[in-house]
Image (cartoon, rainbow, N blue to C red):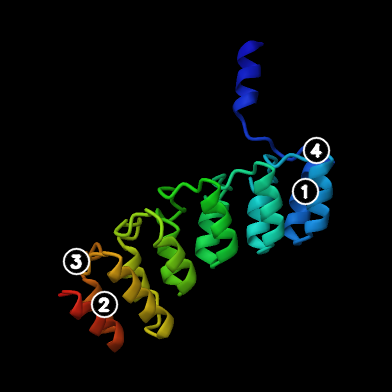
Amino acid sequence: MFWFLAVCLTLPAFAQSGADGALIEAAARADAGEVRRLLGQGASVRARDALSRTALLAATQSNCIECARLLIGAGADVNAKDSIQDSPYLLAGARGRLEILRLTLGAGADLKSTNRFGGTALIPACHYGHVETVRELLKTRVAIDHVNNLGWTCLLEAVILGDGGAAHVEIVRMVLAAGANPNLPDHQGVTPLAHARMRGQKDVATLLAAAGGK
């Protein structure tokens, strides 16, 4: 009996009550007023839906900044992951939800946490060209040369999955200025500079060469 109780206390609180499920639904549709009302009624910020998604993750998906602020203020876990390994912090970085990202950073975001591809929040932010999100993450101690499961750093991802346009050029400039190694290759031994040249990304290649890229 005691063993059963101990196990139950360690398990995530799945949305079983109507208020808990309604809280997640309200956050998903960016209804901050309803989120505030449900929190006042005692709805749990730890509750999860069928996808193991918390209300805070739902608020991040809908980019409801006020919902996120209310939920974090009520103690929501910014590092709680769903069934596909997204957390509010990681998703805010990947989707460029800058204000929510700042809220998660202020609430103890785990900079070492990784998504389903083994990447930190910085890597997809570079991939998708979220300049201000990258700038914000570079103010933290997130590992700039972290390598994901594909064998890519944030610099490699900015080149390989970027388009060589103004946003990605600025991101390459920023991560190099922050100390990214310009010569860390992918799993096939191809360097960022070689990738940039293969893709005709002249401005990116210029930056990489100036930083000592080979």
Q: Which residue is under mark 1?
A: 23
Q: Looking at the image, is 109 positioned above or below residue 5?
A: below
Q: CA gap, disc 2 to disc 4?
A: 53 Å
Q: Look at the numbered disc 1 and give the secondary structure of its residue.
A: helix
Looking at the rendered image, the disc whose residue lies closer to the viewer, 2 or 4, is: 4
Q: Position of residue 65 (x, y in %)?
A: 67, 61
Q: Looking at the image, is 145 positioned above or below residue 2?
A: below
| Residue in front for this viewpoint, 137 or 198 | 137
Looking at the rendered image, the disc whose residue lies closer to the viewer, 3 or 1, is: 1
Q: How many C-alpha atoms fall within 10 Å of the one at disc 4: few (<14), some, or many (≥20)? A: few
Q: Residue at x 57, y 44 (%)?
A: 80
Q: Which residue is under mark 3?
A: 189
| Residue in front for this viewpoint, 3 or 62 | 62
Q: Which mark is drawn over residue 195?
A: 2
- First reached walking from the N terminus: tag 2 or tag 1: 1
Task: Find residue 7 and report its image quarter.
Answer: top right
